[in-house]
Image: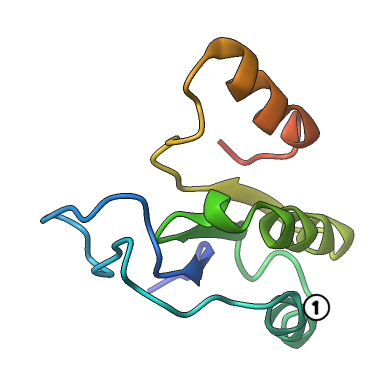
Amino acid sequence: MELNGIHLLLTYQCTFECDHCFVWGSPWQTGTMTIAMIRKILSQQKKPGLWNGFFFEGGEPFLYYQVMLAGITEALNFGFKVGIVTNSYWATSEEDALLWMSPLVGKFII
């Protein structure tokens, strides 16, 4: 089996509690990955090509926006592509969605 991406569960916390959630994310969950943890994972894999990229997800990774942004920057600096899995709770208007996403333009696998 070929590994094609690493999915980092940045947090188990989420804004919702969905029956279909495979990590049992919810507003009551705890546990958040730190930037130090993300750096350690990235440093253990210094050869892009063994997989296609890093995906930040959870729970809801946008709840820890600054850590997510720093992790994305670190992954890009290592030469990896990145993606995010989100429920987009923060996109309550077009203006807000553009504000949250503007630092991320052009940095994704998908």
Residue lying farthest to the front in this orientation: 28
- Per the image, the residue denoted by label 1 is 46
How many discs appear?
Answer: 1
Q: Quadrant of the N terminus?
A: bottom left
Q: Residue at x 54, y 47 (%)?
A: 84
Q: Quadrant of residue 95?
A: top right
Of 77 and 52, which appears nearest the observer? 77
Q: Residue at x 60, y 65 (%)?
A: 51
Give the side of residue 92 with respect to residue 77, left or right: left
x and y percentages locating residue 18 in the rendered image: 17, 52
As helix, strand or loop, the secondary structure at mark 1 comes to loop
Give the side of residue 12 with respect to residue 78, left or right: left
x and y percentages locating residue 29 in the rendered image: 34, 73
Q: Amino acid at mark 1?
A: Lys
Of 56 and 91, which appears nearest the observer? 91
x and y percentages locating residue 11 in the rendered image: 48, 69
x and y percentages locating residue 105 in the rendered image: 75, 29
Q: Which color scheme is applied?
A: rainbow
Q: Quadrant of residue 66?
A: bottom right
Residue lying farthest to the right in this orientation: 77
Q: Quadrant of the C terminus?
A: top right
Q: Quadrant of residue 52?
A: bottom right
Q: Residue at x 69, y 84 (%)?
A: 37
How many residues crowd around disc 1 within 10 Å: few (fewer than 14), some, or many (20 or more)? few
Residue lying farthest to the top in this orientation: 94
Of 71 and 50, which appears nearest the observer? 71
